[in-house]
Structure formats: structure tokens, C-alpha cells
Image (cartoon, rainbow, N blue to C red):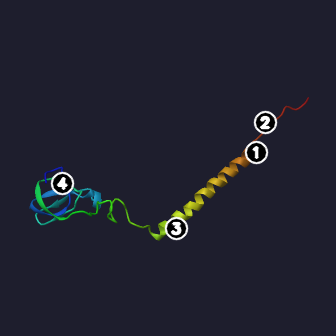
Amino acid sequence: MRPGEKVPVDGVIRNGSSSIDESMLTGESLPVEKKAGDGVIGATINKTGAFTFEATRIGRTPCSPDHPDGPGGAGSKAPIQRLADYISGIFVPAVITIGLITFGLWLSWGRPRPASPSPS
């Protein structure tokens, strides 16, 4: 792997060393130093240095769309998230409906009317 290349699959570094940008997985802003014997994760970016590595896992990595912890997200929602979705599904339409009814009532009866000239 040369600097700037994306690591294609999970593996173990056999020769060389490098700094690997794992921020997409870990959120760590600084590259992680890797040397021979250290593991590398597919879809991370080789920042500096060159190395050769042996692939250990081909297919499902944490960055794979079908991985439960990957970009596709977890397979199911947490119970509190389901409850929040249910409540917002009722609350939001109710608030919008009440707002529209209030606006209609204001248009019908609530607007100030211009004063008519008094007969003199």
C-alpha cells in the first residue's frame, strides 16, 4: 500500500509501517500509527509510509453497507426511538391541524375591520 491509497480489505501488516486514518470508523481525528503485526481495517486510508499486508477478512467489514454497525445502521430501532417516532407521528399533525384551525378562525372573526366613516 502506498500513501494516499484506501485499504481494500481487513488485514494484518506484514512489512513496513504507516499512519492510517481511521476517523470514519473511530472518530479519532489523528491518524493511528501501524507497524508490522498490527491489524488494518478495510476502507481506511493510508496517510504516510508504505506497507504490504495480508488480507484476513474479505467481504463484510464494519464499513460494508450490510454490516449491522456500518453505514446501513443497526437493523432495528431502540425502544425509546420507536416511542419518539410514534409520539411525533401524532403530535406533529395535531399541532399543524390546530394551527390551521386557529388561522381559519382568525381570518373569519379575528381580524380588525376598518372603521366605517360615521354619518355627520
Of marks 3 and 2, which one's residue comes earlier in the chain? 3
- C-alpha separation, residue under disc 4 versus residue under disc 1: 67 Å
Q: Which of marks 3 and 2 is in front?
A: 3
Disc 1 designates what residue? 108
Numbered tag placed on residue 83 in the rendering:
3
Residue type pointed to by label 1 = Ser
Question: Residue 31: where, in percent of width, then height?
Answer: 21, 57
Of marks 2 and 1, which one's residue comes earlier in the chain? 1
Question: Residue 90: where, in percent of width, then height?
Answer: 59, 61
> Quick check: 85 left or right of 75?
right
Nearest the viewer among 59 and 92 is 59
Disc 4 designates what residue? 46
Residue at the extreme top of the image, as rendered: 120
Disc 3: CA contacts within 10 A as few (<14), some (14-19) or many (>=20)? few
Residue type pointed to by label 2 = Pro
Question: Residue 81: where, in percent of width, then height?
Answer: 47, 66
Quadrant in which the N terminus is drawn:
bottom left
Of marks 4 and 2, which one's residue comes earlier in the chain? 4
